[in-house]
Amino acid sequence: MYFSCIPEIFSIKLKADKIKRRFLDEIREKYADFIIEKPPTGAGIAHIKFEVSRGGSVATGKSGKHGNKHFVFSRRDVDFLFDISKLTGVCRISENIYSFDSFMRLLWSVMLVRTQGMLLHSAALTMGGYAYLFVGPSGAGKSTVVKNSLAGNFGVISDELVPVFIRDKKLLTSRSPFWGELEPVKNTSGACFEVKKIFFLSGHSEALSVRRVFQDDAVGSLLKNLFWVFECPALSENILGLAGWIYEKALCKKIFFRKDFIPTEEFLNL
Amino acid sequence: MRIIKGVAHRKIDGRVYVVDSKNSSLHSLNETGSYIWERLAAGSDEKKIAASIASRYDIPEADAVKDVSDFIKKLKAKNLVEP
């Protein structure tokens, strides 16, 4: 099974062994926008040997034995070992789509971080070829912002988790298979959008207010809200570098908003 | 004293940020802390760092020795450096 994730950054070749057709169909349905028929070509292809367990824990308990070359993740339903330099790995999961989704989040995250990117807990709206991110943890209001914006003329990338990465000195984002409360919006285009602003969802208030973000706040908020489970110093340095780059580009603002806040084009371009 | 394996750092706009990869904790260091950290990362010892701080900030060496020692104690308490 082949996935074209972010064509500029990475794709996945999944070699699946002894997987029930019904489970494969479930994966195909959930990741329909990302699955391709022909093998991907070019750089950044992750080769994963993939197995499924139909009972008991798959954990090998190797989590924590990380270095700069390997990423290891092990919990009851997902066991994943990935060689960061060779881009090869082995994954064993319990037979359910949520475990597969967890594995995909891990893989997306590690593939992004190794190439000046990150997977950010953020909603993302698009307008006029640009993207606007609303970053915050669960409960901060990401889905609310997206729901409120649906009446407007926005495209939606996700209400939960979006990839961001640098290309040609620009911060870009693209479609995401990871959604929260909302039904995924179909998007097969694979287009990238330049991120024009990043709003940190900082709490509710009676009146809408947008504030400047200072350096510590910006770096801290980005790190707090990224999907990141690596105990790998080299990847951590990549993340710090990207957070600093984003701060220096002055893309970040803090936003306090009412629950009925509707983003408008004027607001986004303030 | 040396930086513990697994601790990553980056200088951003003049300030050093340190991440302990084991627990994902982020530490932001002030100007002097950033200077001391960079010297530690370059392999300097406590004595040499204190001497360079004294000359850089024009303060008595005894004060610099105490400041550097206090700062390194804090780093040790946070498991960021080890002897």
Image (cartoon, grey):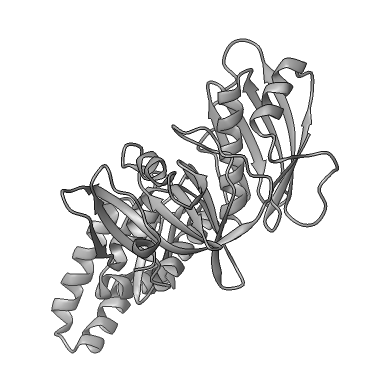
Res A18 → quadrant: top right
Res B74 → quadrant: bottom left
Residue displayed at 22% across by 64% down: B71
Q: Nearer the viewer, residue A40 or B13?
A: A40
Quadrant (top left/top right/bottom left/bottom right) for the C terminus of chain A = bottom left
Residue displayed at 68% across by 39% down: A33
Residue displayed at 40% across by 73% down: A248
Q: Nearer the viewer, residue A158 or A66?
A: A158
Quadrant (top left/top right/bottom left/bottom right) for the N terminus of chain A = top right
Answer left or right for A118 relative to A41: left
Looking at this rendering, what residue extends furthest in the top direction?
A55
Q: Position of residue B27 (x, y in %)?
A: 31, 58
Q: Position of residue A224 (x, y in %)?
A: 36, 49
Q: Nearer the viewer, residue A235 or B51?
A: A235
- Residue B28 seen in the current view: no
Q: Nearer the viewer, residue B76 or B14?
A: B14
Answer left or right for A99 relative to B34: right
